[in-house]
Image (tube, helix red, strand yellow):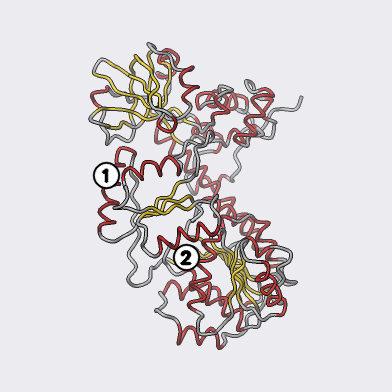
Amino acid sequence: MAPLDTITPIEYLKGVGPARAEVLKSELGIHTFGDLLKHYPFRYIDRTQFHKIRQLHPDMPAAQVIGRLVHLEERGERRSRRLIGLFKDDTGTMELVWFQSIGWLRKSLQVGAAYVIYGKPNLFNQELSMTHPEMELYQRGAKEMGNMHLQPVYSSTEKLKKFTLDSRGIQRLQEALLETLASQLKEELPDYVIEAHRLMRLPQALVAIHFPRSQQELGQAIRRLKFDELFFIQLKLLKNKLLNTQKFKGHRFEVVGDRFNTFYNHHLPFSLTNAQKRVIKEIRRDTASGAQLNRLVQGDVGSGKTVVALMTMLLAIDNGFQACLMAPTEILAQQHYHSIKKLLDNGLASVQLLTGSTPKKDRRIIHTQLEEGTLDILIGTHALIEETVRFKNLGFVVIDEQHRFGVEQRAKLWRKNRVPPHMLVMTATPIPRTLAMTLYGDLDISIIDELPAGRKPIKTLHLYESSRLRMFGFMKEEIAKGRQVYIVYPLIKESEKMDLLYLEAGLETLMKEFPLPDFRISIVHGKMSVKDKDFEMQRFVKGETQIMVATTVI
């Protein structure tokens, strides 16, 4: 039999088998030993620190308590249904509250048993509580606690838990995996790189990321694994850049013509920041070189990415080419269309909007204008990549919020012309997927790191559940000043797979806290028709509503 290594199918790991293997594949995408090895903990519990109930207070980020579950009961109905547990130690009592997985918890939790609980302390009606705490039978954990300094916590799902693959179950698989692969884990970097950057060895880092003996060891493991990720991304980038330079030629924009200069000198309603000027120069340099531009522009909301995109599209038009801008949602596409249309009301370029809701009659007109070359700029959604959309001479493509599009979708725009058009992608959120996609797009990076005059820096504050009433108070103060509020939820409805707040439950709370007629709320989510979404958005824009409750569709 061949030796077990990182490419061995996961079903061959001791303790997995065919049934568990299938659920690991479907729920977490774990197909091999290597996939499981890279399913890292998302946090760690410090098992050396314990608190008494009387020591808990709501300002603590988390706490661990040993006590006994003395009572368990269900309260409320439908959306307000919850499971309440009474937890006691020798200093006091507190409530444990669950809103999800109630049936499973009723079967699993043992009234009268001693537990180690871990969670965020809250204060509600002057009573201590924890919402969705982690529970572990004290008898089962007692032996392990003496040996473990930092306990890993792994992401799981309800389906995995039915196969006893909760966080602790996955932890046991990781123990078996590391024991199996002990002799197979090899160093991947040369010694001189490891020594120059004072890195932990890879085999040691892979053990320490799952089972660290101290915070210091965990920090060294994280540093090593992050270094590897960035190192190999940069290596792949350099390789792709070399290959693409040899393979792809781009349209040469030889002139800075009348449209660009007229817009810049006479119609630009504000002065560009130095950062915007720098990015435009970088794009200009690329488009004049004869090589294909493939650049990512990153900047905060309000930093002026759209104006940079518009001016570079005018540069393309000055050189006899057409341009397009693709956005991930109709709302965003409409916003771009209206803002660019307003900036070009001087007649410098023709602009049209194409989305899934564009009437057939208007579509035919747009298709004809594109093929004849009489339309300069097309703004739209995924509708731009349809086979029926044919440009006469597409030379420049802008993609907004590029992490929302797949590589194949972008490639379809490349194929809209015999010579691939220049590609400019924009984002306000440099999330990990954005970084990963540079592997496939060979993206040079420009950063707009300066806000226009009058724009204030964005302040971000993270609040815990215990501060929800404080947040509502702040919202009411801002609304009283004539300002408005966005509230964005990740989901519309409750999900069994993800323990996330969802719009329907949140809206119910908000309507009680912000009642009519003093407050009015707009609602926008992906299941609504385009007409209804636009109506609600316009109410908010006009100031008819003070609060916008939405999913990430906005």
Quick one: 449 or 319, which is closer to the camera? Answer: 319
Q: In percent of the image, x 41 and y 54: which residue is there?
A: 522
Q: Where is residue 307 in the image (x, y as percent from the top left)?
A: 48, 73
How many numbered discs sit on the rendered protein?
2
Q: Where is residue 342 in the image (x, y as percent from the top left)?
A: 48, 77
Question: Tag 2's secondary structure?
Answer: strand
Query: Residue at the top extreme?
Result: 112
The residue to which callout 2 is attached is 447
Q: In percent of the image, x 77 and y 24: which residue is there?
A: 1
Whether tag 1 and tag 2 are in contact, CB under 8 A, the answer is no
Q: Position of residue 180 (x, y in %)?
A: 62, 25
The residue to which callout 1 is attached is 470
Query: Residue at the front extreme?
Result: 517
Q: Given this view, does label 1 or label 2 mark the residue nearer the observer?
A: 1
Q: Quadrant of residue 240?
A: bottom right
Quick one: 467 or 331, which is closer to the camera? Answer: 331
**Amino acid at dot 2:** Ile
